[in-house]
Each structure stands twice: as structure tokens, then as C-alpha cells.
Amino acid sequence: MNMYDIITKKKHGETLSEEEIRFAVNGFTDGSIPDYQMSALLMAICLKGMNDSETAAMTFAMRDSGSIADLSAIPGLKADKHSTGGVGDKVSLLVGPMVASLGVPVAKMSGRGLGHTGGTIDKLESIPGFSVTLSNEKFMENVKKTGLAIVGQSDDLAPADKKMYALRDVTATVDSIPLIAASIMSKKLVSGSDVIVLDVTMGSGAFMKTLPDAIMLAETMVRIGEASGKKVYAVITDMNQVLGTYVGNALEVREAVYALKGDIAEDLKRTCLKIAGLMLLGCKKADSLFEAEQMLSEVLQDGRAFESFCAFVKAQGGDVKYIKDPELLPKAACKRVVKAEEDGYLVSMNAETVGRSSVILGAGREKKGDPIDMAAGIENYAKVGHRFQKGDTLGILYTNREESLDAAEKLYRSAFCFGALPVAEPTTIYGIVDETGFHPL
């Protein structure tokens, strides 16, 4: 078996065997297969695709390239969730404590932000003292003690994915549904949880720009999860506009804290209830999704979710006074209010453009390793379907880089399209995917 023949086979659109896929993944991981050959194979996969058996084989080979977390010492069924990325996506900050407060352990590994999408790990690090690096023993202890732990992915978990993604990022091979599915699921399967809920975002601010593509990705990942013995759901959510109000790191933590106290934007609430509800349902904590959402609404209102978040932050070294009073979180030295220049209805928003403007302000990274400004970001009041009058506030830009404000404002304004006629507000959730397929809502 050799890499040249494997590349040739896929170039002609033929199906690769599990052995061939493992040979390629293992060889690239250990360095015996060079970057240029793996690049050729990845491009062939992008152009010719992979079927379900190939995608599953790729996922399992990447999963098995490193160690697999063993959560068996934690009693009961464990839940995890993953988002395919978006703008203002602070869902993990809410869903984790909501679910944990109802007795379902959440053991989660998260990533950092890159480009226009924010990372949960970066957001949590805006809390002074908070550590995203825990030993395996401390990670398990925290889940047992508080019901929730969120850490960065360690180097020994799915190392093949880390190496392959870095290569895909520079060879224009990121936008392949089989490769996206294998990348996401290889990381989720090593985390050790029994139930996985996937938030597959769709729209201008997401990887998947259309509903058919989002459904295809979701169905692919659910089938992979089921083949590995996990209970997996996917929720197709809208990312054609900012989720909630804030974009940034400390800004999103602040919004999450107020949301956990019951002051929550309606689109954010709907998304969190659906995702957290499926986590409870999969872990047999509720008999129906409706019952699960009712239980979750109660913990938002009575303070249990907020107390769960406080315990989680404290257990990971964070200073809880910044959660008790989120106004103490880092604040930017400079801000600019962006006002509407005309009357009209907001017809559409390009969420990716809003995200890119937050990167200019310092809230995100253009490439891995770039520093970020925890206080930078956007307070966004622009929502599709709303009517604005000239002079109304569209948003507020925050930064410690005063020289970035002009460029950020120009880009931010370009994200919006106004019209004279009213339009409907976009759907927040398009549907749920389980082992039987897509179910529109």
C-alpha cells in the first residue's frame, strides 16, 4: 500500500477502503507521509467527496490517532455539545450550567476562535484567574463536584485532526462536508461523553451558507455518532445575524451572566433551550423535549443555572466577584456609537462581516497565535426585520485600539441592507436531525 495509489484512486472518484484511509491518516500523523501528499489527497476528497463509510473511517482513524478520554468514573450519562461556529455564539456559556444544574454532568473540551468566529475558551479566559488547562484528575474532580468543566483540547486528543486542519487551512480544503464532519466528530468522540448535541449553524456567519448543506453536514455527523455507539442530535440554527446582542469575549461573558439571571435575548433563549433540552432528553432526564425545556426555563428563572455557573468558574480558578458583578469584567478604553444614516427596515445582515469588524477591533484572530483584546467587541442592536429611524443606534464598537475604529465602523456599516418595506424576522431554529433524519420546526 502506498500514498501515490491512494491519491490516484480518490482522484478518479473511487471509494477508499478503511485500511487505505487509516494508512494515510496514521502516516501523516507520524510524519512518514509528507504534507504535499496529504494535501493532494485532501484536495481530491474536496473535489470527489467521500461516502458515509469513508467519512466514518476517516473520523475513527483521526479519533484513534491519540488517547480517548475515559469518563466512566463520573456517575450517570454525560452530555456534550459543539457548535460549528458563528458570531455572538455564547451558547456553551449558558447551556453548560443550565444542564449541570439539573444533574447531568457536562465534560466539555472547547477551542479558540479563528477568523470571524469566537471561541469559548477565549471568552472564559476574560474572567480573571480562570484556567482552561486542567490535569485529567482535576478535570474529572470538577465534573464530579460541580457537574461542569470546560477545558482546551489537549495535544494528545485527536492529534491527526490538529495536523490535518492546519494543512486544510492553507490549502483551500476546509469547505468539504466529509472533512468538516470528520474533524468535528473525531474531537467529540474522544471526549468520552454519552450524548452529543451539535449546533450546526447556517447562514452568512456560518461555514454552511445554505440549509441543504447544513442538513447534509448534520445528517453526516449524526450517522457517524450513531455508528460509534453515541446518542447524537443536531440542531440547525440561524447565523444570518448576530446571536443575542454582544460580539466579543468579556462582552459575551457579561451577556451570558445576565442571561443566566433571566435577562436573556429571545433568539438566544430559544437556541439554548433547544440544545440543552436535547442534552437532557438524550441523558434520559426528561421524557420529552417540551418537558426538558420547561425544566430549563425554571433553572434560568430561579437562579440555579447562575449558581451552577458561579461554582464552575470558582472550581477552575476564576474570581467569582466578576460573575457576581459582571460590570467588573474588562472594559475597553474607546468606544464609538454607530447610528443609522437613513430611515428604513433592516432587510438583511451579513453576520460574517460583523464578525470581521470585531476582529479589526481586536476581539478575534486572523491566524492562530494572534493576541486578542478581551475587552474589544460590538454591542449590536441591529436585527433583521426591525425598523430604524435616522439617528437610531445600530451598535456600539469597543476597542483599546483607537486607530481601528474608522475601518471597523466602515466594515460594520457594510454588513447591513435597509429597505422601505417590512420583512419577516428570520427563523431562529430550522429543525432537528436525529438518527431518522431532518425534522423541520
Image (cartoon, helix red, strand yellow):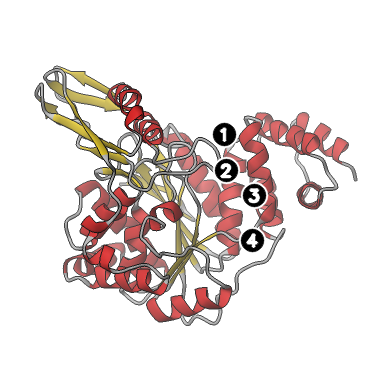
Q: Is residue 5 above or below residue 32?
A: above
Q: Is residue 429 above or below residue 133?
A: above
Side of 138 relative to 308 (left or right)? right
Q: Nearer the viewer, residue 367 or 428?
A: 367
Name the element at disc 1. loop
Identify the amino acid type marked 1: Asp
Q: Distance between the residues labelled 3 and 4?
A: 9 Å
| Number of the front mark, 2 or 3 | 3
Q: What residue is disc 3 on?
A: 162
**Helix, strand or loop status at disc 3:** helix
Badge 4 marks a residue whose secondary structure is loop
User: Which residue has dot 1 on it?
Assistant: 175
How far apart marks 4 and 2 lie (CA) works out to 17 Å
Graded by Cα atoms within 10 Å as few (under 14), some (14 to 19) or many (20 or more), the crowding at tag 4 reads: many
Contact (Cβ within 8 Å) of mark 1 with mark 2:
yes
* Quadrant of image for the N terminus: top right
Amino acid type of the residue tagged 2 in the rendering: Ile
| CA–CA distance in space, label 1 to label 4 | 23 Å
- Do labels 4 and 2 touch, CB within 8 Å? no
Crowd class of label 1 (few under 14; some 14 to 19; many from 20; radius 10 Å): few
- 401 sits to left or right of 345: right
Where residue 155 appears, as percent x and y from the top left, is 64, 59
Amino acid type shown at disc 4 = Leu
Which numbered tag is attached to residue 180?
2
Whether residue 428 appears in this view of the structure is no
Name which residue type carries label 3: Lys
Callout 3: few (<14), some (14-19), or many (20+) C-alpha neighbours within 10 Å?
some
Of circles 1 and 4, the one toward us is 4
